[in-house]
Amino acid sequence: MRFKRHSKCVWLAGASAMVIGLAAPAAVAQEDTGETQRTLSTVTVTTQKTEESIQDVPIAVSAFDEDALAKMQLAGGPDLVKSIPNVNFTKGNFTGYNFRIRGIGVDAVSTSADNGVGVHQNDIPLTSNNLFEAEFYDIERIEVLRGPQGTLYGRNATGGVFNLITAKPVLGEYQANIDLTYGNYDTFKAKGMVNVPIGESLAFRLAGSLLQRGGYVDNITTGNEIDDRDLFSVRATLAWEPTDRLRGWVSYEHFEEDDNRLRSGKQFCKKDANLTTFAGIAIEPDDQNITSLGCEDAPLSESKDRVNSTGTLAGSWGVVAGLSDGDVYLRPALSDERTIESVIDPRYQAETDFFSWKAEFDLTDSLLLTYLGSYNESERYSEEDYNKSVPDIPFNDLSAIPPGLSTQADLYNALFPGGFVSDPQLGTFNQLTTYDLSGGQSEQTTHEIRLQSDFSGRFNFNLGAISVNYETGGADDIGESYYVMSNTLTAITQFNNAVYQATYDAVIGGGGTADQAAAAAAAQAPFGGLTPVDTSGDGEGSLRGNINNLGRNYFRSVTPYKLDSFAVFGEGYYDLTDDLQLTVGLRYTSDDKTVQNIPTYLFTPVSVRPDPLVPVPSATSANGIVNKKFEEVTGRIGFDWSPDLSFSEDTLIYAFYSKGYKGGGINPPQPQGTPSIVPETFEPEFINAFEVGTKNTLANGALQLNATAFYYDYEGYQVSQIVNRTSANINVDAEIKGLELETIWNPASTFVVNANLGLLDAKVKDTEAIDVLDRTAGDPNYIALKNPFDASNCVISSQAYATVLGAIQGGLLAEGSTLGLCTGAFAGQESTFGLPEGSFTPGQGFAKDLDGNKLPGTPDMTLSLGAEYTWETVSNSNWDVRIRADYYYQADSYSRMWNTARDKLDSWENLNLSLQFYNDPSQIQVELFGKNVMDQDNITGAYLTDDSSGLFTNAYYNEPRTYGIRVSKTW
């Protein structure tokens, strides 16, 4: 039987018991010739919950120990793309990230959406984690499995699994190490650990990591460097082995960050200018502002403007309030990728407390029972300038108009003296100012139990069950939300309330009743009633300290979410012959998801929603608590064959079919007044995955060559698009196929070369959808216009639009009449204007055929090349010198499945270099390093904002060139 459970004591032996990752060469003396045989040392993984050589595992997996990560300069999660084929990693727009394997990540935007790639620590699934922010430290190894997982891991995943195995305490041995780095940008890193035995059966291990550095980005408005880092993490683990049959550990890890990390990157826009004529008809000034959507479709390389503010919600209401007359951004955007102009410096805070524990008990010599548990508490908070641009035109100053000449001017001057708006959240400014705040809090508890066999016969098994309970913060938690705050939104709310109050007082003063006064005031107020401004703040300091989360003067999206998940899973292994094994795996998953339906409440009067945090009834829930249960049975089946071939020392050939599954979810609540604009839920994802592969050890152990080919039939891939200021998640079908090659070659005892190649063809199929960048789908018979009241965009007949413009020019309609086109103000009046029926009915647009388009974030090629050479015992000393280079290339990709000019992301490359001096007897290392030595500003991902933001794109960059010196000592 080839399937062997791990030795009971190996996990206590520490990482020194195995060499992993780059598989550094080992020299073995030949008995007869005295020659040195070059062999690659064994890489051990536990992907099948038992310790095996990576070459014996019939799964596409990459593994790295701490030494390999240091050599290849893979400091954290975002760096992994440079060493694993067909992997992509980029920031997200809302404090998250997207880690894709073979084109599969998470493109749905919803608290109830599951990740396509499962992130685990010590086999424990982490729904909220720090893979994006934190750096690796004191680890035993990292394993990344490619392909659908579910029969081995407690939480199922469609794309693959990332698993970080931390170093555990070592019994009976004192150990310690310290690792210090200093580099440019005033970078200082410190990592270390100490291992202390306590008697014969106990050991304690304490490890920590610190990162401090200056900013990569200049904010020319405040004069400060931003996007710096100030974070640390500490981990304490206690291991106990009271008997030969019982062992376990308990661990606590704390992570904390407090700095000005930039959440969203550079903004790109090709300005969509206001039209002054259409079809030869002049457009009056009051009608021009609805003709700009903010930005138009163009390649990022040509998008060097700032957004047309009239195409945004904040800018549009600024015009309505009289604060501005049109676009306030006139200058081009700053050309430097790492320079912004922002009224405030960003703030970023994150904190995590993670408790985990594991116990193993040998029921018999052939049966191992394992229990794994955890509790994770996480909080993340980010605030920054939404547009990262300072307006060129201040608000209008009407103070020169004497009192009494104009009622409107008097009200304006009373509310906005000198053109300054006093916003309790943002402060007092006389220019358009918009911030956003993204945050989240969560708690998770997991319990997992496994039973593994190690029989001497042909059959063995691995069975497990897991429960996961995950919950985000409640609606009353200030930090549990996404907010957008603008002083023009506050200004128009103040204006609404002033009109309401003035009308109310006038009716009461005239002898009217309170009910009559309220009705009259509501009729005059733009929002139909009193709409409270959040006055809890003073505009100073952090945004979070200036909000009570009840204000109707800012946008807030909050979706309290609870997950109760249970699954049973397992695999059986049967040796058909001595070199042919059959594997059959099954899984049952039940995900019970609950969301509170709390629509956004910007501009919503108290009379409509007295308490904005009370859940609102939905299409499927009378009490506003939406519940959806997703259940599925999945599995995999396949064969692996280990033939005895004359040209290889070890060969494994495998072929598997697996059914991947990811549960559906509940779309975020829609804005008040538009509860059914998108479906309430989105459906699960399914993958029929076919994979064949081979792993080979050749050239007397000096060469490893692995290859994998795969084909995915993807049903219901979850993707998101922002509709009316909230996420709308839909399902599309796709087809993914690819090839992966990985090799390590040791041509000489001091020379190692590694390479991997990923080829990927990931396409949408049988799908149509509306492109918000081109709602008319290029049809000249229609035009896209702006709804000035909610800043959404609509499509209307070009003939109907021209007819209204002509009526305005002819004096039949008042200037500004076109502002009602997107609200349907003219619907049903077609006969009056001699137009076909339905011409005045606004629509969302026309769907495009997306069949054959690339899935987001799926470059068709990734390439990694690495080489290192070692000079041993330099000058007959104990010092060795190693030089290493690592090159990475990623081909073009797209940020959205529409594959427009704006969506295209250029190919990019990266080169890392290092020179290391190490003394094995003294266990001292000194390294000079450079990362991204070509100093390329590479865009790793992009996010298209919605209609109300003006359709600009946020782009996310890699780190610039960094270099420095690293010194480490081990005891």
Image: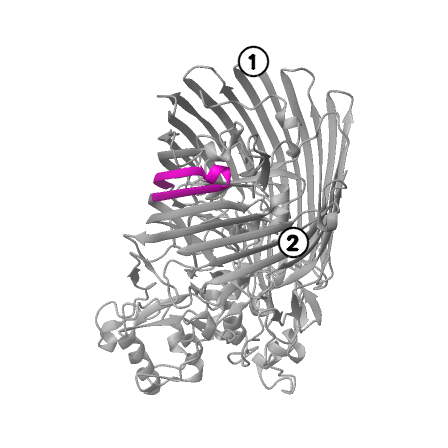
Work out whether residue 604 can be spotted. Answer: yes
Which segment did they paint magenta?
685-711
- The image position of residue 253, as x and y in percent, is 68, 38
Q: Is residue 225 left or right of residue 855?
A: right
Residue 235 falls in image quadrant: top right
- The image position of residue 454, as x and y in percent, is 49, 18
- In the image, farthest residue toward the top: 364
Three-letter code, disc 2: Asn
Front-lying residue, 631 or 927? 927
Q: How is the image coloured?
A: one colour
Q: Residue at x 59, y 77 (%)?
A: 391
Relative to 785, say whether 686 is above or below. Answer: above
Q: Residue at x 74, y 42 (%)?
A: 923
Residue 318 falls in image quadrant: bottom right
Q: Quadrant of the N terminus?
A: top left
Q: Which residue is mark 2?
A: 548
Q: Is residue 699 magenta?
A: yes
Three-letter code, disc 1: Leu
Q: Quadrant of the C terminus?
A: top right
Q: Is residue 545 magenta?
A: no
Label 1: element kind:
strand
- The image position of residue 69, as x and y in percent, is 61, 46
Residue 45 falls in image quadrant: top right
- Label 2: few (<14), some or many (≥20) within 10 Å? some
Instruction: Tell me which secondary structure the magenta stretch mostly adopts.
Output: strand
Label 2: element kind:
loop
Distance from disc 1 to disc 2, alpha carbons, whole Å, reads 55 Å
Q: Which residue is mark 1?
A: 363
Front-lying residue, 171 or 219? 171
Relative to 443, say whether 891 is above or below. Answer: below
Q: Residue at x 40, y 27 (%)?
A: 585
- The image position of residue 943, as x and y in percent, is 48, 60
